[in-house]
Image: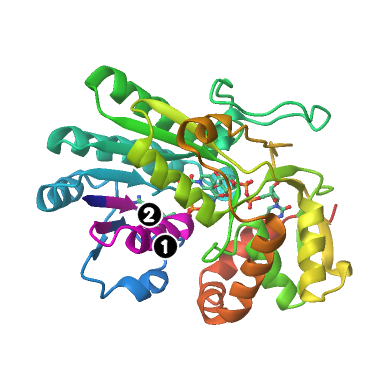
Amino acid sequence: MTVIVTGGAGFIGSNFVFHMLNTYPDYRIICLDKLTYAGNLSTLEPVMNNPDFRFVKLDICDREGVNRLFEEERPDIVVNFAAESHVDRSIENPEIFLQTNILGTQVLMDACRKYGIKRYHQVSTDEVYGDLPLDRPDLFFTEETPIHTSSPYSSSKAGADLLVMAYNRTYGLPVTISRCSNNYGPYHFPEKLIPLMIVNALADKPLPVYGEGLNVRDWLYVEDHCRAIDLIIHRGRNGEVYNVGGHNEMRNIDIVKLICKELGKPESLITHVEDRKGHDMRYAIDPTKIHNELGWLPETKFEDGIKKTIRWYLDNREWWEAIISGEYQNYYEKIYGSRARH
Ligand code: NAD
Ligand code: TDX
């Protein structure tokens, strides 16, 4: 089997590349990645010399380049992680989100149609369902929940999902979609909540919590997400959507306090700042379908996963120090410089 993994130099994609190379020694894994600010070739260093692995620097919007790669490799499966993924950036500059997340998905699927594949898998997100109220803990996102997006990011992901289903129905392209809750774990870019708080706390810098920090996210260890996608691409039913989540809802403020505790840092570092525009209140996934159909269950409990993640950031300082020393400074100033204390 030859599998093209797009966005494999990013957080979840790189964890998936490692998962696939470890799990299927007879597979060929091709990573296609543009290496945007979020892509990091050093992450893939351990597998660069693996004869079953190939890295190709390419934009998924580059139709000619994508077709050439498909011509050369004739993939059986394509797993699309490549995306602009940060909500705050989408609020600042939506356009690149529409380009990569929607038009890039179209280019990939056109190549899949042209060269023929067994499965195109779209890595989507629970954010396409919008949010749930805090006072209705009985409500969860199922695969039947209507699409109802809040941010340019989630709207671009929802647009891509609709296009994937249209290619399935109109052209008969074999597809699946997974919609996962918030991931955490190694190689998470330090613009996202958990790695940002770890990195700032280690430097005794303020921990910028948006608003009161009462928003709830449903956290899943990245390896559990990778196992879910592995199951879906091999055994998931053509044309189906699968929600992925581990029933692990936590308030942002409680996560930040936990990180302070684990690192022995004072909670006085916590700084409440102006809220995110259009901030979704609560995400919560009902994973019954993937459990019943494919037997998937999360394996890592949050208490263990967060400890492992913090340990990883302590043991791999050079990975994130290289990131926060460059262009990241401008980004940080742009997003947080103008955010007044709340
Ligand atoms: P990330 O930002 O860490 O990585 C994205 C990767 O895609 C980077 O390596 C980047 O270089 C690459 N990329 C961006 N634009 C590209 C383009 N035009 N062509 C080729 N490569 C390009 O993102 P992530 O957190 O690993 O998320 C991966 C996928 O999973 C995304 O589709 C995201 O929407 C989805 N998702 C993420 C989460 C989460 O909690 N992080 C949860 C659910 C779904
Ligand atoms: O500095 C911060 N302070 C803060 O309070 C940051 C970066 C975030 N937050 C809050 C906003 C959210 O309520 O923490 C929560 C998590 O924020 P993010 O890490 O930006 O994630 P989120 O917006 O929930 O989106 C993530 O999960 C779904 C991923 O970035 C998406 O790619 C994925 O689809």
Q: Residue at x 54, y 35 (%)?
A: 291
Q: Residue at x 58, y 53 (%)?
A: 299
Q: Is residue 13 above or below residue 139?
A: below
Q: Position of residue 327 (x, y in %)?
A: 51, 69
- What crowding class fits label 1: few (fewer than 14 Cα within 10 Å), some (14-19), or many (20 or more)? many
Q: Is mark 1 within 8 Å of ligand 1?
A: yes
Per the model, the C-alpha gap separating discs 1 and 2 is 7 Å
Of residues 252 and 277, the one drawn nearer to the viewer in this rendering: 252
Cβ atoms at labels 1 and 2 below 8 Å apart = yes
Q: Is residue 145 visible?
A: yes
Q: Quadrant of residue 279?
A: top right
The answer to whether residue 26 is magenta is yes
Q: Is mark 2 within 8 Å of ligand 1?
A: yes
The answer to whether residue 179 is magenta is no
Q: Amino acid at mark 2?
A: Gly
- What crowding class fits label 2: few (fewer than 14 Cα within 10 Å), some (14-19), or many (20 or more)? many
Q: Position of residue 141 (x, y in %)?
A: 62, 28
Residue that mark 2 sits on: 7
Mark linked to residue 39: 1
Q: Quadrant of residue 191?
A: bottom right
Q: Is residue 206 visible?
A: no
Q: Is residue 73 left or right of residue 121?
A: left
Q: Residue at x 63, y 64 (%)?
A: 195
Q: Which residues are magenta?
A: 4-30
SS of the residue under disc 1:
loop
Q: Quadrant of residue 333?
A: bottom right
SS of the residue under disc 2:
loop
